[in-house]
Image (spheres, grey):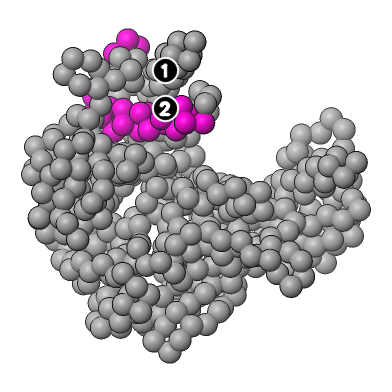
Amino acid sequence: MIRDRWEYVRAETLAGALTLLASRSDAYPLAGGTDLVIAGRLGRIRGGVAVDISAVPELQGITAFPTEAGGVRLRIGAATTVSALLQDELVQQKLPALVDAGRLLGGWQIQNLATVGGNMCNASPSAELSPPLLVHRAEAVIAGPEGSRRLGVDRFWTGPGKTALARGELLVAVELETGGASAYVRHQIRRSVDIALASAAAWVSVEDERIAGARLALGAVAPAPLLVDVAEEVAGVPVRQAPGKEPDDPGAFGPALAKRLQRVERLAFAAARPITDVRASADYRRAVVGVLARRALLRAVQRALAVSEDVETRSG
Amino acid sequence: MNRVIRINGTEWPADVPPTTPLSDFLREHAGLTGTKIGCRTGECGACTVLLDGRPVTSCLVWVARAWGRDVTTVEGLGDDQRLDPVQVAFLELNAAQCGFCIPGLLVSARALLDEAAARGWPPTALEVRERLSGHLCRCTGYQKIVEAVLKAAENGMKEMRLELG
């Protein structure tokens, strides 16, 4: 029997949503419901007023706009479902790590309900979308009673279930710069409807067959997702598809990268501060996180090279 | 908002407490007991229905979120005279054993085939496995289920070609 007690209110406007959220201390934003409804049912939340924000116009849609530097910036509304994210052509082209992560999030039914903003605000240390958002240097657009503000996602998650959102504030969207290539990998028990024991996202940019920039983020190995500084370790390293090697082989893009990847693995190992829980021990998580970091970087490099080949073919 | 849900094409008044799970509403108020309830936490997929054509775990959907929208349950597949091709394929390949997971699997498979038809080519086995991975079957495993969906896709594509030809 269900014992949680919820009142349901539907917000039609952003201002309306903010007023409703500020009206009571037990007001919760409701987007997809895949976390809030379960939290109520399992007794983690007693109930309260659920403010349905899924129809608020400012929280909708994926839009692209040009940047001053001549690039493209993407704005993803907080109420965008994971399915809508996966179907978006620009996301597919520009944010491959986010696509990797979205496909691993829950199953199809959950992807049709769950939202980008919900995954961020539930702030699980193992949340699928966090490492990709970190490596793409996403910025959270936040609205509140005092007006709106922006915050880099590297400061958005502050602990398990905790974010930098103040009471009465609402996540409206995330914005990301595009460019470079990325990948996300995770380790888990079941391939679907499961969460990460540990995960890693990597972003790289390759210029003239050398790594120009790189970022690495780890999930489920600390109270909040972690950015690990690896840029110096791999900057300038030549990368070229080595013949006859699988893309997951550390030597797939030449011996120089293979050597640097060992250092990346050690950095990931050193940065991880995992806990032991029902899914895995802290030692196990530390043991796999370096491997995940390596695989994510290799996959990102592979994609970066494929993209530059594409450009060459087109310009040639 | 009009407190009405269109279920399998028929408008149903749904003036119940707005936080009633859609799964409970379907079974207890609409009398459509084809939809099963397993875990109540969105993990088993037994309660899957289509909401505006997309599979969702109906235990996680409050009735208020379905007001004004289309819901398809297993009762909405095929009609009294004719089964849906997906149901035919499940029967032909003995893809059901105890049957508890089947109503959810059938509607997800229907949505998958509709998606494939819209883009014009059949799903791969890997795609079927990925799309249906949110459905737990505790009897026999998934081999025959995947085969049945692929068979239904093949039959569907044949029909499409006949229509075109």
Q: Which residues are magenta?
A: B91-119
Along the line of sight, the residue nearer the viewer: A100 or B22: B22
Answer yes or no: do the residues labelled 1 and 2 have beta carbons within 8 Å?
yes
Q: Amino acid at mark 1?
A: Gly
Gap between marks 1 and 2 measured at Cα: 8 Å
Host chain of mark 1: B
Q: Which mark is residue A183?
A: none
**Mark 1 or mark 2: which comes first in sequence?**
2
Q: Position of residue A259 (x, y in %)?
A: 85, 51
Q: Residues within 10 Å of mark 1 (few under 14, many from 20)?
A: some
Write the residue at 82% across / 66% down: A232
Whether A207 is among the magenta residues is no
Q: Position of residue A192 (x, y in %)?
A: 45, 41
Dot 1 falls on a residue whose secondary structure is helix
Residue position marked by numbered label 2 in the rendering: B113
Task: Classify A249 as above or below A86.
Answer: above
Residue B50 shown left or right of residue B21 in the figure: right
Write the residue at 54% across / 72% down: A140
Q: Amino acid at mark 2?
A: Leu
